[in-house]
Amino acid sequence: MAITYLKTADPRPAVENRQTRDIVAQMLATIETGGEAAVRHYAETLDGWTGDIVLSDKARQAAIRRVPEALQSDIRFAHANIRRFAEAQKTTMGECEVELMPGLVTGQKLIPVSSAGCYVPGGRYSHIASALMTITTAKVAGVPHITAVSPTRPRTGIPDAIVFAMDLAGADLILNLGGVQGIAAMAQGLFGARPADILVGPGNSYVAEAKRMLFGKVGIDMFAGPTDSLVVADATASAERIAWDLVSQAEHGADSPVWLVSTDRTLAETVMARVADLIDSLPPVNAAAARIAWAERAEVILCDNPEEAATVADRYAPEHLHVQAGDLDWWLGRLQAYGSLFLGHETTVSFGDKTSGPNHVLPTSGAARYTGGLSVHKFIKTVTWQRCNDAAAHELALRTARISRVEGMEGHARAAEMRMRP
């Protein structure tokens, strides 16, 4: 293979990860002992929030009324697509019952978790779509109680549009909390929340680390790192569209990798030449993040043919994989490792991030090699059951006892043989 790197990324520093772990560990320990008082302290010192932690019904309705009708319509459009896709996913799941041998009946049952905690990022951007993606999916899965949290703005709390999206999607309880303290409050069941069985939703490095540390005590959707995106393109693609697709994903943050894998050198070089001007055209805050991401995290890779490009894409296992090339059906059948796949120049990752339906909470940092994104499946436990009559028990006991004794587990053997007695 003749793979050529036209642009390479800098190695990611490890010291920041250690510092983040230490800070999060201390915060979680403080909140575990200090409870709600500790959460309020962090909310005030980190976010400048001294108002109510629980968003009252009155405040919720007031926020909803302040959202312009046109924006409400857009959010409802996105919610409908996300809900319908989640409902379609749920139809792929099913319970079953099978008699494996005469008298031995086994089965599979689907049980939603009792409570979910949904984190909606705030900070630099107001992630309306994340509220829809997490809460709607939990609701469709049948979760009885859903708590949602999001970072507050000083004196105003959670942005009105996020509150509207949380309410529309079906949040039972909304807490004016962000960061580690929001995650911990949902995990512990503070401020009237039910202790979360599972925590879901994207967030910054501190939120991701808090979820990682709490995993085991509670479930989580995935270990999430910075968002990433890879475009595969051939000579038929538009350099302008690709450049914007890369820049739009780089604006997520300075640590968000974007990659271009192309079979056409002219296209790749044209994209590289165009990116700087597009970044400069963004608002200052967006441009600052995208400029660093492009300079330090972006890579441009030249391949000889589609198979070589597909091999590179599978190796990167990107969160978002966008193919802008010919023979899309070939790519759909060939590609094996991605969080979500976008086929053709007509679509864009921005659609998936906001409105098109499939969930945008996806595996990052190469995790798409072994897992998919958030879905109704994450909120539903697939459990099994079995029962048998005396005839089946006799046969099972004989074989179980023999295997148990070979393994050295005498107690298992005797427990099995008890079922042979009248």
Image: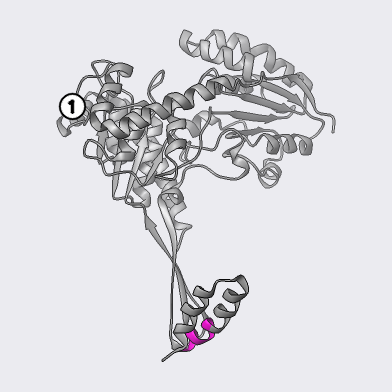
305 horizontally vs 75: left or right: right
Residue occupying the far left of the picture:
58
Q: Nearer the viewer, residue 389 or 221?
A: 389
87 horizontally vs 370: left or right: left
**Amino acid at circle 1:** Ala
**Majority secondary structure in the magenta region:** helix
Please, what secondary structure does the residue beneath circle 1 have? helix
Residue at 56% across, 34% down: 364
Number of callouts in the render?
A: 1
The region drawn magenta spans 391-397
Residue occupying the far bottom of the picture:
422
Question: Does residue 116 sit above or below 350 in this rendering?
Answer: below
Q: Quadrant of residue 179?
A: top left
The N terminus appears in which quarter of the rendering?
top right
Q: Nearer the viewer, residue 304 or 179?
A: 179
Q: How is the image coloured?
A: one colour
The residue indicated by pointer 1 is 62
- Callout 1 crowding tier (Cα within 10 Å): few <14, some 14–19, many ≥20: some
Q: Nearer the viewer, residue 13 or 225?
A: 13
Residue 260 in view in this figure: yes
315 horizontally vs 206: left or right: right
Question: Does residue 134 sit above or below 283 in this rendering?
Answer: below
Q: Nearer the viewer, residue 79 or 101?
A: 101
Residue at 57% across, 39% down: 339
Q: Where is residue 368? Give x, y as percent.
A: 60, 40
Q: Where is residue 97? Give x, y as percent.
A: 46, 73
Residue at 42% across, 29% down: 25
Q: Where is residue 105? Give x, y as percent.
A: 46, 78
Q: Quadrant of residue 280?
A: top right
Residue at 46% across, 78% down: 415
Q: Quadrant of residue 293?
A: top right
The C terminus appears in which quarter of the rendering?
bottom left
